[in-house]
Image (cartoon, helix red, strand yellow):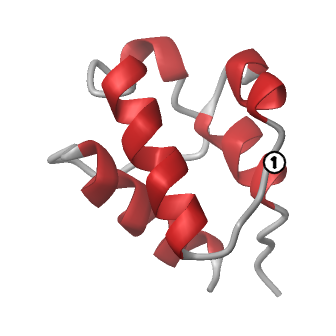
Amino acid sequence: MNVKELLIVVAEALEYEDELHLDQKIEDIEEWDSLGVLSIVSMMDDLKISVNLEDLEEIKTVEDFVKLTGILDD
């Protein structure tokens, strides 16, 4: 999985209708609320991606989230 594919899957988990961008602030994404985070955590579990939940609470941008997952583009 690459970053673009991850962003598509996260947007689907959030039921976010637009495309996610790395520079987006989490606070500006209405769907990234407590229910959205539960959906993301469930999606990550299905994909066997593990992150520290405390770190997930500290992210400020979509790029911060991507870095937590360890998924990088080649």
The quadrant of the image that shows the C terminus is bottom right
The type of residue carrying mark 1 is Leu
Q: Up-down: is 57 above or below 55?
A: above
Q: Up-down: is 66 above or below 28?
A: below
Return the residue found at the far top. 27
Instruction: Residue 60: give x, y in percent of width and height.
Output: 68, 19
User: Taking the image as drawn, is residue 33 in sight?
Assistant: no
The part of the image, by quadrant, that contains residue 44 is bottom right
* Count of numbered labels shown in the rendering: 1
Question: Image point 46% across, 54% down: which residue?
Answer: 42
- In the picture provided, is 34 more to the left or to the right than 15? right
The quadrant of the image that shows the N terminus is bottom right
Question: Image point 75% across, 37% down: which residue?
Answer: 64
| Crowdedness near tag 1: few (<14), some (14–19) or many (≥20) residues, C-alpha within 10 Å | some
Question: Circle 1 sits on which residue?
Answer: 68
Instruction: Residue 2: give x, y in percent of width and height.
Output: 64, 81
Q: Nearer the viewer, residue 70 or 3?
A: 70
Q: Nearer the viewer, residue 49 or 59?
A: 49
- In the picture provided, is 5 more to the left or to the right than 52? left
Question: Image point 47% across, 12% down: which residue?
Answer: 27
User: Taking the image as drawn, is residue 7 in sight?
Assistant: yes
SS for callout 1: helix
Instruction: Residue 38: give x, y in percent of width and height.
Output: 43, 36
Instruction: Residue 22: give x, y in percent of width and height.
Output: 60, 45
Question: Image point 49% across, 77% down: which residue?
Answer: 5
